[in-house]
Image (cartoon, grey):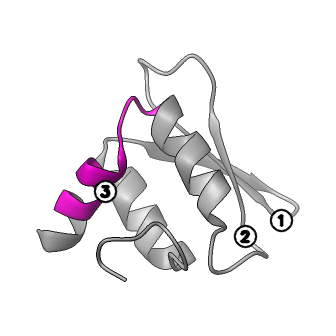
Amino acid sequence: MANSLKNIPLKTFRDYLKWKGCKHIRTTGGHEVWSRPDLFRPIIIQTHIDPIPEFIVRQILRNLNANSVDYIEFLKS
């Protein structure tokens, strides 16, 4: 699992967002809004879907200008 973007627990992905410098802005309904000053759009994650689907993780990584290697480095730290 360490080399895959599948089955990422919500808690682990929240820690990754913090590691990337994102701040939790608010929670509305079942959605958390995260942001940082250099992002063009906020990051939205659904709190009722755990683990996070791979396609959502890939979208968020693109928004952060990151890739799967960056995420795997986070897991090793």
Q: Which residues are magenta?
A: 64-73
Q: Is residue 19 left or right of residue 15?
A: left
- The crowd level at tag 1 (other Cα within 10 Å; few <14, some 14-19, many 20+) is few
| Amino acid carrying mark 1 in the image | Gly
- Is residue 19 at least partly visible in the picture? no
**Does the stretch in magenta take in 53?**
no
- Pick the quarter of the image with the C terminus: bottom left
Q: Secondary structure at mark 1?
A: loop
Query: In this figure, which residue is indicated by the disc labeled 2?
Result: 47
Q: Earlier in the sequence, mark 2 or mark 1?
A: 1
Marks 2/3: CA–CA distance: 20 Å
Tag nearer the camera, 2 or 3: 3
- The crowd level at tag 2 (other Cα within 10 Å; few <14, some 14-19, many 20+) is some
| Amino acid carrying mark 2 in the image | Thr
CB contact under 8 Å: marks 2 and 1: yes
x and y percent of residue 27 in the render?
73, 56
Query: In this figure, which residue is indicated by the disc labeled 1?
Result: 30
Q: Quadrant of residue 52?
A: bottom right
| Amino acid carrying mark 3 in the image | Tyr
Q: Is residue 57 left or right of residue 53?
A: left
Q: Earlier in the sequence, mark 2 or mark 3?
A: 2
Marks 2/1: CA–CA distance: 5 Å
Marker disc for residue 71: 3
**What residue do we see at 17% from left, 59% from top?**
73
